[in-house]
Amino acid sequence: MNSEAITRAPPPAPVKTGVRRVALSPVLLRLLTLLAALLVLFALLLGDRLFNGAAVRSMAFQLPELGVLSLAMMIPLLSGGLDLSIIATANLSALAAAYVFTHFGLSGGGASMLAWHIAALAAAFCVAGAIGLLNGVVIAYLGVSPILATLGTMTMVKGIAIGLTHGGVIAGFPPFMVFIGNGSVFSVPMVVIVFVLVAIPVGVLLTRTPFGNIVAMLGSNLQAVRYSGIDTRRVLVKVYMLSAGLSAIAGLLMMARFNSANAAYGESYLLITILAAVLGGIDPAGGFGKVSGLVLSLVILQLVSTAANLLNISQFLSLALWGAILLSVAGVGRTWAWLRPYLPARAGR
């Protein structure tokens, strides 16, 4: 082989090192940037008043119940729908469990008491399953708009809860329920552990399973999914039953944290769950969104809420701040999408 052939030989292929480049989605990048900016701002304004063990612990105890409710809202949103009945479902489910706990689960011992405890939790999920089934059937088989169907369900379920309890509170539960709501394991609140144990399977379900793919496709193009031969009605029923089941978990968490159940707990959470979902990148029209974005948006909202309390800002102004954050993040995303075609392409692309 002569020297000319050697000089004309192609360069050797690059050696793969096995290191994979992890790229963040634009939504996560915006949320992380916003979170970093808020941390710096509140560090300057509040310092140790916000970033201390007591404040962080308080945020950790408050966030999970709202987080599970936001997951319950996220799934119908991904399918192109909405569930306005999640708070009413959570409260009625908690009241069902509270009734069994207080009438049967506080006396006796051993296997008998354990059986009643399991029956109380089962009662909560049975009530939630019935509500979710009603929502799913009315929406999927009768063709009623999700907003109207779940609004009607919300009103009916709340009326049943108030009528059965006369607006009163059921209180006094077994020690394990109080521990779930207020206890810690290695300084980690139990409610946080429960939230993680719920959020991870939901994230896997929505991104790694055929059911999750179908739910996303329902929100993207319902007619195309129908033409593909998938029974969209059965999928929608499962969507609303899953949403109701998550609502029951949130209701049990609220019941455990307050050591009581009531028909009116968490009413201010409804619009916040929609705000958290949309802020976290879930498309209101359906089809797109991840649990990771939802969790980041919950952290941001909880951080703003706690900082506002420490700064003695009115609760109504806190709501205004949340709305401003949503508009800012959504506006930046839309502006970037509008500007992208006019930006110069990267070299080498």
Image: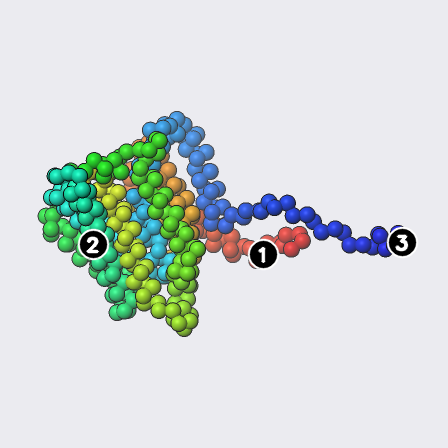
Looking at the image, which is closer to me, 108 or 252? 108
- Return the x and y of residue 270 as percentages of the image width and height: 28, 50
- Tag 1's secondary structure? helix
Does residue 185 sit above or below 9 in this rendering? above
Identify the image quadrant of residue 242: bottom left
Identify the mark at residue 342; answer none if there is no mark. 1
Q: Amino acid at mark 1?
A: Tyr
Taking the spot 34% from the left edge, 64% from the top edge, the residue there is 235
The colour scheme of the drawn protein is rainbow
- Residue identified by numbered label 2: 127
Looking at the image, which is closer to me, 59 or 129? 129
Taking the spot 39% from the left edge, 60% from the top edge, the residue there is 211
Q: Residues within 10 Å of mark 2 (few under 14, many from 20)?
A: many
Q: Are marks 3 and 2 in contact (CB under 8 Å)?
A: no
Give the CA distance from mark 2 to mark 1: 54 Å
**Mark 3 or 1, nearer chain start:** 3
**Is residue 292 in sight in this rendering?**
yes
**Is residue 267 in sight in this rendering?**
no
Which residue is situated farthest in the top direction here?
A: 48
Identify the image quadrant of residue 116: top left
